[in-house]
Image (spheres, rainbow, N blue to C red):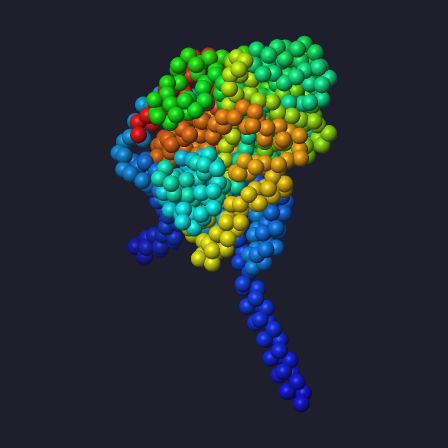
Amino acid sequence: MKRAFVLVVVLLASVTLTATLAFSQKTIELKHFNWRPEDLEKWGKIYDEFMQENPDIKLIDDPIPAANYFNNLEINLEGKQADPICSIWQNRVWNNNMFKRGYFVDLTALLPEFKKVPPHHQYNFMTNDGKAFAAPVSAQYTGMLYNKKIFKKYDLTPPVTWDEFIALCKKLKGAGVTPLMFQVKDAWHIHYAFDLMMKPFLGGPAFISQLMSGKYDFTNPKFVDALKRLKSLEPYFPKNYTGLGYSDAQNMVATEQVAIWPGCGSWEVYTIKNINPDVELGVFPTPVAKKGDRAYVTVFTDQGLTIAQSASEEQKQAALRFLKWMTTPRAGALVNKYIGFFNCWDTNVFEDEALKDYAALAGKNGELIISDWAILLSDGSPTATELIQAGISALMAGTKTAEQVAQDIKTGLSVWYGKK
Amino acid sequence: MRRRNGTFVVLFLLPALFIYSTFFVFPIILGFRVTFYKSVFGFLDQYVGWQNFTLLFGAETFRNQFFNAIKNNFIFLGISLIGTNILGLTFAFLFSTRKLRGAGAFRNILFSPQIIPIITVGYISSLIFNPSLGTYDKIAGFLHFPDLFVNVLGKPNTALYTISIIEILRLLGFPLTIYYVAINDIPTDIIAASRIDGANDFRILLHIVLAMISPILITTNVLMFIGSFIYFDLIYIMQGYLGGPAFSTDVLGVFFYRTTFGGHHGGGDPGIGAVISMCMLLILAIVAIVGMLMQRTLRRRLSL
């Protein structure tokens, strides 16, 4: 009797065990590799919504700091041990090279939702012959971020032209406030600030197409002039700004030590608010050359989700379901709500004042310039971003003149630019 | 009998030789091979012969950056080696020839930066020298330092020297400990005899101590040279991948990293990077061989 009882218990236990094992095996685990450790919780909320509708898939955020992300991603993809879902960035050249190497699943047929995304947000994640390989998730704007309290205190309104902008800076400086934030140490942001402020003077889409044609001469007077213009803003930068880095910029804006941060990205708003929730921020469009000129807006498609070719068939199917779910206006609204980023549907709804201002930029002035242009010239070594960052660093340190910097950029690029 | 010993010697050496060849010699040969190819994402893409060499030494941008990096390397090396040697010898001599109270504790404090990871040293140093938050600039302002000594890491003409001084402080413990042990090993009767002859401390240090520890001096300096020559970590952490400001802190290690892996937006060329590392290997090999030869003659002369 006892033996039979034990036998029954053992049988029941093993049946339950195999049953639970069978059921738990059905949960497919997908890791998402990206460069935003600061968004860990926020992505978690989006995953939760997806997992509610798809309980058999488990999404795990797997971020590493941005500085080494792309090197790491390259190594992982080559070694065939990348996470099933990897985020890629606006660097179209890099993206295309990686796709050509066969690292990403071709999504052209698998993700019909891709074609419904506004065309300017498809650009960074597709090849020249129309093959898609990433689902666009978020976009970023850069703008002239300003402190509303300081403006109110000194009775200032956002400037429209460059001359009004300089007059405003002079007034602030006279009153003892540091007008502009600029830092040189963390090289990657230099170009955002330069690109944003100089767009009206370098030209819009015409300038970009000239660059892409491989025939742009960086020593032309317009470009040298733009460099000189940047240098002319030096009196309005913080004291000893050549020793300040990006986190100093975040801190100084958050602690209201500067009035305006040119080139501040929309991705910074939440970070600054985290440091100081009381700061009131707004964004005004880039000052134009003369009244009536069209202001260009820098927006770029920031993050796209790819499916790694090295993932298992099961993982690829599950990842595809997630990508399909993410490439919808509904998911776009969640990106707005939880992460505070712009989505790729241009249907952005924010509660935050600064983000609302960013969104309004496109409406007021229209013309969107897709991706900051230096990244377009990164198909060889040395890249344009490297040369511009190094050049502006030398310009601001005073070791080179604007003409010399322009010549350096031209000489550096001449190794490969225009030769393909 | 002798032949049997010979076979045993070879057999004992074989495993070490095997490991050494696999992990050191073979990768160097492969690395040399990379210099002849254009690489894309770490794969050897296409054979280009000597093109990487002509690019590095011919293309103005690369050439300027290369020789600038070499120049910075030697400035950095010179200051840190001379500084650590002078300070290391002086302290080691003082500690070993005199009974100074608290010498042990002081030695430990001087050695402590060696235990801290370089990344931590880099971050703490950047914070100290940060113009808006750091202690250094606050003190400089309070004591009204001249303009040259403010914002030292943000100016091209002071950045490298500041980093060299930080490196002296970081590296000091290493030669200090070795010299201390070496000086202690000198037979005391030699020093006692020279004191009887009327030599003062300075002469003892210069003529006797230096001569007697010269083999160890050479070895330690060769090691420090090799370490400092390929130096990368501190400068990358503090000044970024461009060795700023304006390439003033760009050393060969950082130049190599930038050329091979590219910057924030990709764009590296491992072929040219391989050429740079071959040049570094050549310089290091020459220094190591010269050091070894000097050390051997010195040992023989001292009949140790």
Q: Quadrant of residue A233?
A: top right
B171 with respect to A113 (left or right) = right
Residue A31, given in percent of the width and then of the height, sits at 53, 51
Q: Nearer the viewer, residue A15 or A4?
A: A15
Q: Residue at x 55, y 68 (%)?
A: A22
Q: Nearer the viewer, residue A380 or B200?
A: A380
B33 with respect to A318 (left or right) = left
Q: Nearer the viewer, residue A47 or B126?
A: A47
Q: Tell me how many marks there are.
A: 0
Residue B226, given in percent of the width and then of the height, sits at 45, 32
A69 with respect to B152 (left or right) = left
A188 with respect to B95 (left or right) = left
Residue A419, given in percent of the width and then of the height, sits at 30, 27
Residue B200 appears in the picture as rendered = no
Residue A178, given in percent of the width and then of the height, sits at 65, 16
Q: Which residue reaches farthest bottom?
A: A1
Location of the N terminus of chain A (image quadrant): bottom right
Q: Residue at x 58, y 16 (%)?
A: A160
Location of the C terminus of chain A (image quadrant): top left
Residue A352 appears in the picture as rendered = yes
Q: Is residue B293 above or below residue A204?
A: below
Q: Residue at x 63, y 13 (%)?
A: A168
Q: Quadrant of residue A5?
A: bottom right
